[in-house]
Image (spheres, rainbow, N blue to C red):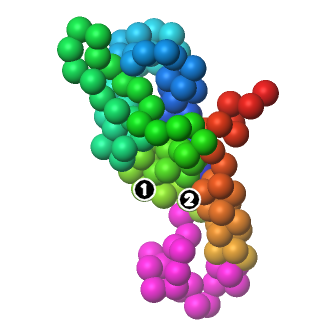
Amino acid sequence: MLMTRASEYALLSLIVLAKADKPMDADTLSRELDISKSFLAKILQAMARKDILNSFKGAHGGFALAKDKNDITVAEIMNAAEGKSPAVFECASNESTCPSEKASACSIWPFLKRLQGKIDHFLEHLTLADIMEK
C-alpha cells in the first residue's frame, strides 16, 4: 500500500509546480497531467493544509510550493496525500497497536518493523528535489 494513486498524483503535481514560474490552478494541472480534476483538487488542498503548498484565490490564483523543493520530503508529501504515514504493510509499528493483538507472538513482526523503519528513514530523507533529478 506504500504508494497509491494519491501519492503518485501528489508527486507529479509538485514536480510541475516546482518547475512553474507562477501558481497553477487545479484545472490546468489536471489537464496537463491527465488526472481527474476533482481528485487532484482534493490532493492539492490536503497538501495546502499541510503547508506543502500555498493556495491563492482569484483570477490568477492557484497553487505554488510553500517552501523550497529541497525542504519538502517524499514522506511528508505521501502523508499529506494519504492522510496518514506511508506503510508497506498493514502491520502495526508497535506491539500495543497491533490490530490482531498478536504482535508479541508474531515471528515476522520484528522484521517488518525494521523494514518499515528503513523505508520511513529513506522517505524522510528523500526530497522533491531528489526525485526531480535526472
Pointer 2: what residue?
A: 87
User: For numbered disc 2, what is the local secondary structure?
Assistant: loop
Residue 39's disc number = none
Residue 27 point in image, percent of width and height: 36, 12
Q: Is residue 116 above or below residue 67?
A: below
Q: How many discs appear? A: 2
Q: Is residue 59 above or below residue 12?
A: above
Q: Position of 46 compared to 97: left or right?
A: left
Give the amino acid type for the residue marked by disc 2 in the picture. Answer: Ala
Q: Quadrant of the C terminus?
A: top right
Residue 133 point in image, percent of width and height: 74, 31
Residue 75 point in image, percent of width and height: 55, 52
User: For numbered disc 1, what is the local secondary structure?
Assistant: loop
Q: Position of 92 compared to 53: left or right?
A: right
Decide whether the magenta segment is chiefly helix, strand or loop: loop
Q: Residue at left 51%, top 17%?
A: 20
Q: Choose top left, top right, bottom left or bottom right for residue 31.
A: top left
Give the amino acid type for the residue marked by disc 1 in the picture. Answer: Lys
The answer to whether residue 100 is seen in the rendering is: no
The answer to whether residue 23 is seen in the rendering is: yes
Q: Residue furthest right?
A: 134
Q: Residue at left 54%, top 26%?
A: 18
Q: Residue furthest left?
A: 58
Residue 24 point in image, percent of width and height: 40, 16
**Residue 7 included in the magenta stretch of the image:** no
Instruction: Determine crowd level at label 1: few under 14, some 14-19, many 20+ residues with C-alpha closer than 10 A.
Output: few
Q: Are marks 2 and 1 in contact (CB under 8 Å)?
A: yes
Q: Is residue 113 above or below residue 55?
A: below
Residue 84's disc number = 1
Along the line of sight, which residue is nearer the eye, 66 or 125?
A: 66
Q: Which residues are magenta?
A: 90-110
